[in-house]
Each structure stands twice: as structure tokens, then as C-alpha cells.
Image (cartoon, rainbow, N blue to C red):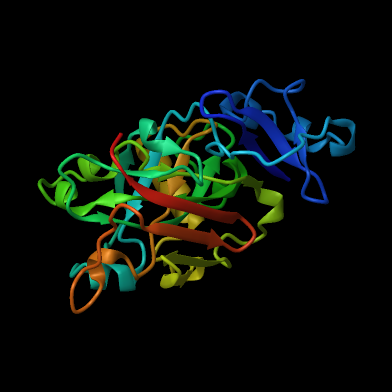
Amino acid sequence: MKLCRVGARGAEKPAMLDAQGGLRDLSAVVADIDGSALARLDDLKAIDPATLPLIDGPQRYGAAVAGVSKFICIGLNYSEHAAEAGLAPPSEPIIFLKAPSAICGPDDDTMVPLNSSKLDWEIELGVVIGAMGRNVSEADALDIVAGYCVVNDVSERAFQMQSTQWDKGKGCDSFGPTGPWLVTRDEVPDPQALAMKLAVNGQVMQDGHTGTMIFGVRQLVSYVSRYMTLMPGDIIATGTPAGVGMGKKPEPVWLKPGDVVELEIAGLGRQRQKVVPYA
């Protein structure tokens, strides 16, 4: 099942895709695609999409999940990305948080922050939690996962490297495109078997695969749950493969107004963001 949120910013309605790719309105069933809806995912799966009204015409996709309480990110989770950053692969997952206010729709503009000089991209597999979990074992970790989505962990490297804490360079407005869909776990038999690709102005920059993560989804969900209670609707962004702008040789490549970033993960959909000045 593919769940999504469509409509103008701040007025999105919950929807699901039918077998033909049509959008079906879930507004009479749930208020939004949020933690409370994900906690009753089995009820949603039991719905026949044909019984729901069609949403006609082109639509803006909002962020795949509303009301996210924690946007958890994992750093340096691909060996080649660690190498391009000039860092050793971590011996255990690196956790940092992205501000929930950074979350936006998959095709919303990326705003260049004030005083930005090193704006960068990072395609990532997003893991969406569907049930509360604390000290979850690796064997049981996927049981609390609702599904998966595409995430672009937009980053401002100059801000990020100004201190030992990365949040400032990761949490700016528009730095968390998610979606277009939340694809439920039953449609993704193996989250470590997904191809992922990102292009800037049509040039492929990242061409990776979730199978090359240092720490897989089971490990990450279990590990994070040791340190914070995972709640329905929380997102874990699982790290990015090699090919970020910071790592380009002979010189880094930074995003600038007018650039277009396109990214996709097999089976999870596609995003497109235009880079614009801060408004």
C-alpha cells in the first residue's frame, strides 16, 4: 500500500494509491497520515481503494508523514561516503536529529539559507515507525516499521562543520523533503535491496544501493530504540551513499539557485526540488 498526503501546503488531505496509480481520498477514514493513522495500519490495509472517492487532477504531494515527533538521522552509514568525507567508517551508528520544521513535500523548493555557501544533497532511505518501540531487538525491529520513503537530507556543510554538532547544518527550513509516498513494509520485502539515484541538473551524482549500508535497517531501528522511545510516525533517515557535493573531486560542487535536484529509490517514488533563494 502506498499512502500519501496531497494538496496545498498546510491543507493536505490523506490519500492512498489504487492499483492504477489513482489517488483515493482517505479523509473520511483518517484525519491525516500521521502517527495515529500508522498505529492502525492494519485497518487501512483492509480498505478496498475502489470504495474511496477519486482525487482528480494534478496534485502537490506533501510530506509523506504529518506530525513527526522525531526526525532521526544516521551519519556516515556507507563506507564510500565516509571515505569521500575523509573519515573512518564508524564502529557504531552516528545519530543526530533533524528539526521536524525542516520536513517538506518531495517536490517543494529547497531554500538557500541566509549566509549559505556550501549547500549539498544526500539521498537516503527513510524508515517510518508504525508502533512504539523501546529496547527493540534486531530480530523484532522490522515489526515496528510501518514502511519506507525517499528522503533528501539537504545539508549546509559550512554550517554543519562550524561545531561538533551537525543539527545547525541539517535542520534548516526545506532541508527534509520526504515522500512522495509512504510505502508499507509488506511491499518492501527487503529494505537492503533497493537501488537509489540522485541527479543535479540531469547529471547523476549518486548511484547507490541500500545493500551497501554499514548498519542495516534492523540494526538501526534496534540501536536507536536503546536511546529514545520510537513512536508511530517517527522517521529514521539511514544515511547516504557516496557522491555528495562535498566529496566531488577535484573541487566540491555546491548547489545554487536555479539548480534542480532529482532523486529516486526503486519502488518508493521520485522527488524533484528546485533550489531557490531564501524567502
Q: Does residue 36 appear to the left or right of 17 in the view shown?
A: left
Measured along the vertical axis of the image, is residue 12 above or below residue 216?
A: above
Q: Quadrant of residue 205?
A: bottom left
Q: Quadrant of the C terminus?
A: top left
**Percent from the top left, x then y, of residue 268?**
61, 55
Residue at 54%, 31% in the rendered image: 232
Name the one closer to the observer, 231 or 256: 256
Residue 277 visible in this rendered orientation of the protein? yes
Q: How many marks?
A: 0
Name the one closer to the observer, 204 or 129: 204
Residue 222 visible in this rendered orientation of the protein? no
Q: Does residue 9 appear to the left or right of 45 in the view shown?
A: left
Q: Does residue 269 appear to the left or right of 170 in the view shown?
A: right
Residue at 70%, 23% in the rendered image: 30
The residue positioned farthest toward the left in the image shown: 162
Measured along the vertical axis of the image, is residue 259 above or below residue 46?
A: below
Residue at 25%, 73% in the rendered image: 248
Q: Quadrant of residue 143?
A: top right
The residue positioned farthest toward the front in the image shown: 258
Q: Quadrant of the N terminus?
A: top right
Residue at 68%, 41% in the rendered image: 58
Measured along the vertical axis of the image, is residue 4 above or below residue 124?
A: above
Name the one closer to the observer, 27 or 44: 27
Q: Quadrant of residue 229?
A: top left
Name the one closer to the observer, 28 or 60: 60
**Percent from the top left, x then y, of residue 81?**
31, 68
**Percent from the top left, x then y, of residue 270?**
57, 56
**Percent from the top left, x then y, of residue 26?**
74, 28
